[in-house]
Image (cartoon, helix red, strand yellow):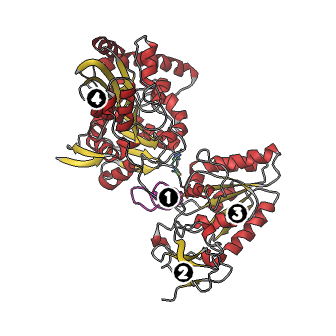
Amino acid sequence: MEMLLSGNEAFARGVYEHGGEFASAYPGTPSTEILETLARQCKADVYCEWSINEKVALEVAVGASWGGARAIAAMKHVGVNVAADPLMTLAYTGVGAGLILVSADDPSLHSSQNEQDNRFYGKFASIPVLEPSDSQESLDFVKDAFEISEKFDTPVLFRVTTRIAHSKGLVKIGERRTVEHAGFEKNIAKYVMMPVFAIVRHKMVIERLEALKRFAETTHLNTVEMGDTKVGVISGSVAYQYAKEVLPGASFLKLGLSYPLPMNKIIDFASKVDRLIVVEELEPFYEEQILAVGIPCEGKKFFSNFMELNVERVREGFIEAGALPKSTALPKQAQENVLPRPPALCPGCPHRGLMMALKKCGVNITGDIGCYTLAALPPLETIDTCLCMGASINHAFGIEKAKKTKKKTVAVIGDSTFLHSGITGLANVVYNRGTQTTIIVDNRITAMTGGQDHPGTSKTLMGEPTHAIDLVQLVKALGVEHVRTVDPFDQKTTLAVLKEEIERDAPSVVITTKPCVLFPSKLKPATKFHVLLEKCTACGACFRIGCPAITASSEKNEKGRAKSQIDLELCTGCTLCFQVCPEEAIQELKK
Ligand SMILES: Cc1ncc(C[n+]2csc(CCOP(=O)(O)OP(=O)(O)O)c2C)c(N)n1
C-alpha cells in the first residue's frame, strides 16, 4: 500500500515497521511531528514521551536501548547541542538494541536561531550519519539505521532537514516486524565510562570507524548512477533531488550514508568523470573530506553555504560552473506583490499584557526562546536578548554582576523553557546572591512549537493524566523567597507587582497565569470589544499594543489619521486595548 507522507510521518512509520519500541523527544521544528505521529498512530506498540529536554530525551532512549528496546530520540538541530554531553560518550559505550538519534536541521532558519550543520556531530563523535533524500527513504533508512546500530554497536545519527521533514511524497508502507533483544545486562567495561574503561572503548571507536568505512564502500545506501561523464555529481539529502532535476543526464554518486564517506568509491567515481562537483546544503562537509584525500572537486564556490538550496540556486550554480549553458537560465520570476507580514503575538495572547506592563518599567529584558521572543519586534520592542533555551536568567545575572549597567535587568522565560533549562539558572542566581527578577510566562503549554504538553501541564504524550509541577513551590524550593503570580490581562496590578519586585534587593520571581489563547478550552467564552468611532481620536494607543485584531478603519480624524477598528473574528476579549484607550472609545460589544 502507498500513502502520502511527510518525511517525519514516514520516519515515524519506519520506527513502527522496524520494531521500534521506545521514542522520546523534546519538541522543536522541524522534528516535532515525528513523536506526534508516533503517539497518535502507534502508541499501542511504541512507548512515546515528551522529555523535559533533549539531554533527557537522549538519555532515556539510551536507557531503553541498553534495556533491550529499539529506541529513537528526536530533536531539532540545536537540541543536539543540549544532548551533546551524553552523545559524545555514548559513542564509546555503544548501544543495546538499535538506537537512532534524529537531528532535524533547519537550513534557512525557518524557525530556528541558527543554521548549524549537524552532519559534523557524526564526524565529531565518530558515529555513522544517515541522510534520506525523500519520504520513502525516511521510512526505509530506519531499517538500515537500526541494523547498523546493532551490527556496529553504535548510535546512528539520522539527519534530516526541513524540506525532507516537511515535504510529502508517496511512500510504500509495510507490516510491523519486531526483533527480540535481551534486557539490561551488567557489563561495566562497556557501560561505566571511567577512564580505565573509556580508554579501551575509545580504541574500539577508532576500530569501529574503520569497519564503518569498509561498510560505506559496499552499502546500498551509497549508489552510483552513471550517465554523461563530463560532470560527476556527489550529493545527498534534498540537494540530490535538486541536482538530479537540474542535471538529469549527469553521473551521480548519491550518499545515503554521509559519514563515514566511501572514499574508495569516490576515488573510483572521480576517475570515471571529467570533473567532480559536490552539491550539498550548508557546510562543505563532503567537499572538505574529499579534498583532504587529494581528490580534486568543486562545490561551495558554486553552491554557497548560506541558506538552503533550491532548484533555482542549484541551476544557477551549475551555470556558473559551466556545467549548463547560460541559455538554460530561467527568467527571473516577477516579485509577487505581497504585503510584508511580520510575525506577531496572537490576538488575546497573554504575553502581550506582560510586555505592555514591562515596557513601562524602564528595565533591560533578557529574553528566552518561545512565543514571547516576538515581543522584541515593534510595536512592543521589549525583549533585548535571545540566544538559546534557558539563557535569559543567566544573562540577566551576568549583566548584574558586570556592574556596568545602571538600569535593572529582568529575565523573561516561558514555562516549557523554564522546565527545559531554566531551573538550574535560577538556582545559580540564588546560590550566587543575584537580586534579579525572573518572570515565568506560564501559558501552560509549549506554544511556539504547536502546543505540546510538558511536566507542568498534567498530561503525558500518551494521553495519561500525571503530576503537574507546581512552579510556585518549585521556585520557592530553589530558595526564591519572593514569588508572586499575576494575571497579565490586569494591567494595573501587573505593573504594580513588577515595579515592586524589580525594586527589591533580593531574587524574586513573577509568574503570569493566563493560558495560551490557542487552547480555548481553557478560556471563558469571549466577550468581544469594538471601537466607538465617534469617540475614537486616532491617538494610536491601541495600535501600539501590536494586536492583529486591531486595524485601521476607513474613518479618519481631522488630521487625516485613521481611526481603529477591531476584527470581531479575531478579538478574544482579553481587554488589553480597552485598558489602554484614553478616550473610552473601546467598549464591550453588547450581545
Ligand atoms: C534546544 C532547543 N530545543 C527546542 C527548541 C524549539 N523551541 C523553541 S521555543 C520552545 C519552547 C516554547 O515554549 P515556552 O517556553 O513554554 O514558551 P511559549 O512559546 O509557550 O510562549 C521550543 C521547544 C529550541 N529553539 N531550542
- Mark 4 or mark 1, which is nearer the start of the sequence? 4
- Spatial CA distance of label 3 from label 2 is 24 Å
Q: Which residue is mark 3?
A: 359
Q: Are marks 4 and 2 in contact (CB under 8 Å)?
A: no
**Residue plotted at (81% across, 61% down):** 504
Residue 49 position (above or below residue 201)? below
Q: Amino acid at mark 4?
A: Leu
Q: Which residue is mark 1?
A: 341
Q: Position of residue 566 (x, y in %)?
A: 52, 76
Q: Which residue is mark 4?
A: 247
- Spatial CA distance of label 4 from label 2 is 58 Å
Q: Which residue is mark 2?
A: 529
Task: Answer few, some or many: residues within 10 Å of disc 3's Cα (few below 14, many 20 plus, some between 14 and 19).
Answer: some
Q: Are marks 3 and 4 in contact (CB under 8 Å)?
A: no
Query: Is label 4 in a helix, a strand or a loop?
Result: loop
- When asked about the image quadrant of residue 256, the answer is top left
- Is 2 covered by the magenta stretch? no
- Is 449 covered by the magenta stretch? yes
Q: Is residue 38 left or right of residue 77?
A: left
Q: Amino acid at mark 2?
A: Phe
- Seen as rendered, the residue at the extreme bottom is 590
Nearest to viewer (mark 4 / mark 2): 4
Nearest to viewer (mark 3 / mark 4): 4
Query: Is label 2 in a helix, a strand or a loop?
Result: strand
Task: Answer few, some or many: residues within 10 Å of disc 4's Cα (few below 14, many 20 plus, some between 14 and 19).
Answer: some
- Spatial CA distance of label 1 from label 2 is 24 Å
- When asked about the image quadrant of residue 209, the answer is top left
Q: Position of residue 249 (x, y in %)?
A: 23, 26
